[in-house]
Image (cartoon, coloured by chain):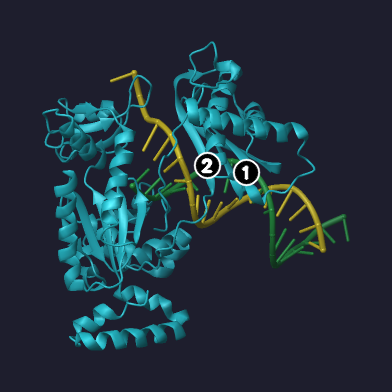
Chain colours: A cyan, B yellow, C green
Amino acid sequence: MFYIILPYITLKNIFTEKIALLKSLTCVIIMLNEHKFDKKDAFMIVMHIDVNSAFLSWTAAYEMQTGIERDILKIPSVIGGNEKNRHGIVLAKSIPAKEYKIQTGMSLMEARRLCPNLFVAPPNYQVYVRASKSLREYLNTFTPDVQVFSIDECFLRFTDLGRSKALSLAHGIRRGVYDNFGYTVNVGVSENKLLAKQAGDLEKPDKCHTIFSEEVEEKLWPLPIENLFMVGRKTKPKLNRLGIYTIGDLARSNYNMISSLFKSHGRLIYNYAWGRDDSTFKRRDAIKSIGNSSTLKFDVTDTETAHAIILSLVEMTAWRLRESEMTCRVVSIRIKDKDFNYILRQKKLLYFTSCTNEIYKNICILFDRYWNKRPVRQLGVSVSDLELANFQQLSIFKDRNILNNEKLDKVVDVIREKYGDTSVIRGVFANNELTPILGGYPEDEYPDMSSTL
DNA sequence: TCTGGGGTCCTAGGACCC
DNA sequence: TCTGGGGTCCTAGGACCC
């Protein structure tokens, strides 16, 4: 953080030997003005790296390595879930598929209607996690400041890089990724994360663009409003009704009106429209909730089956909770019926726990109390109000039984880690078709998937 | 063969206390 | 008996992201 004035100085062509001196002076000045730290972002370079059609690209690169002779990137293709299990949506699309107006999240049926020759490949998450990790390690060779935003997006920060050099470095990174891994990325360059991300979205694939603050009017404002980060499905029509169709329209609109109509979300997107983003490169905040959910292969109409599915979800969630060395005090359930109506119900416990049985028992109580008997399509469980396990105080409400169960859980965790997930399963799963452990376990950390960049 | 799964943040309304 | 306001906590639901 002490090098921030450097690019500015280099721009002014000051001799190199004087820079060291100025640098130390700057250092002192900044330390004296610690409360004015916001200014520093003006001289910082942020890059946003986005893998083009990530799941497709990684699948294609993997197929190439294993000798499969086809290029799914060059044909209309998607990565899609298993339709028989009612997971049939588009997870990623190739650029040719995009020309058929196929969109992520669309059902595979709809996608096929738009493009009858569509090629559909199943997802392979192990490949994606490996690919994501290798990319991150590579990016780390350019700067230690790499912040993971999602499985296929990162931010890089440079504190000692001039603007003129930034774009050529961005191109170097883009080419380097292609040469090393065989897939393309977009690199957006700017002075904050929001603008870097917007710059990366300008033109795809395999491109580098900048949007510095003085370029906002020229490059950001002409774009349709829905291209702005944090303007989604619901907000777009509301803004349209106010006559706001482009990002520039929002920037030039009345701040007080936007603020009173859309509250804090309105203030956020108004500032985004001006390219203002004061988020920092801080490490990830503590995790707030952990949960798993699953769309069921068939609609569930009886309590017994529902309880068994809840148990399989809780097995995964509670395991992840213990893995994070956390305990929870609030448990919740989400029940979605066959018509996609859903309810959420939560319950605050009298103590913190990470015990599978306790969480399961309480979620079942919620389910039994609030289920309206309509056929259930999807069930989700989650835990929140988390606290580190070693902070935990003994509660008078917690009996010996729970404490023993917590010990048992830890033993089961160790066995499962050693011999596989299904080495120890609950009795209820022994003689039926249900999966004993349900839900995904994110193997990697994707911090800051939050709305504030 | 209609429509996934993992999160975070914000707001409104009600209960309760002083 | 009626009428208050402020503050906190809790819950449900909705918006957004990848």
Residue type at tag 1: Cys
Q: Nearer the viewer, residue A111 or A180?
A: A180
Check contact, mark 2 vs mark 1: CB within 8 A. yes
Q: Are marks 2 and 1 on the same chain?
A: yes
Instruction: Name the residue beneath numbered marker 1.
Output: A328
Q: Which of A248 and A428 is in front in this view?
A: A428
* Crowding near the residue tagged with mark 1, few <14, some 14–19, many ≥20 C-alpha atoms within 10 Å: many
Residue type at tag 2: Ile
Q: Nearer the viewer, residue A371 or A295?
A: A295
The residue depicted at 42 percent of the width and 66 percent of the height is A257
Q: Quadrant of the C terminus of chain A?
A: bottom left
In the rendered image, residue A363, in percent from the top left (x then y), is placed at 63, 32
The residue depicted at 50 percent of the width and 26 percent of the height is A437
* Crowding near the residue tagged with mark 2, few <14, some 14–19, many ≥20 C-alpha atoms within 10 Å: some
Instruction: Name the residue beneath numbered marker 2.
Output: A290
Q: Is residue A379 visible?
A: no
Farthest residue in the top direction? A431
Q: Please identify the quarter of the rendering in which residue A18 is found.
A: bottom left
Using the numbered discs, state the Cα–Cα distance from disc 2 to disc 1 in whole angstroms: 9 Å
Q: In this view, does A200 lie above or below A423?
A: below
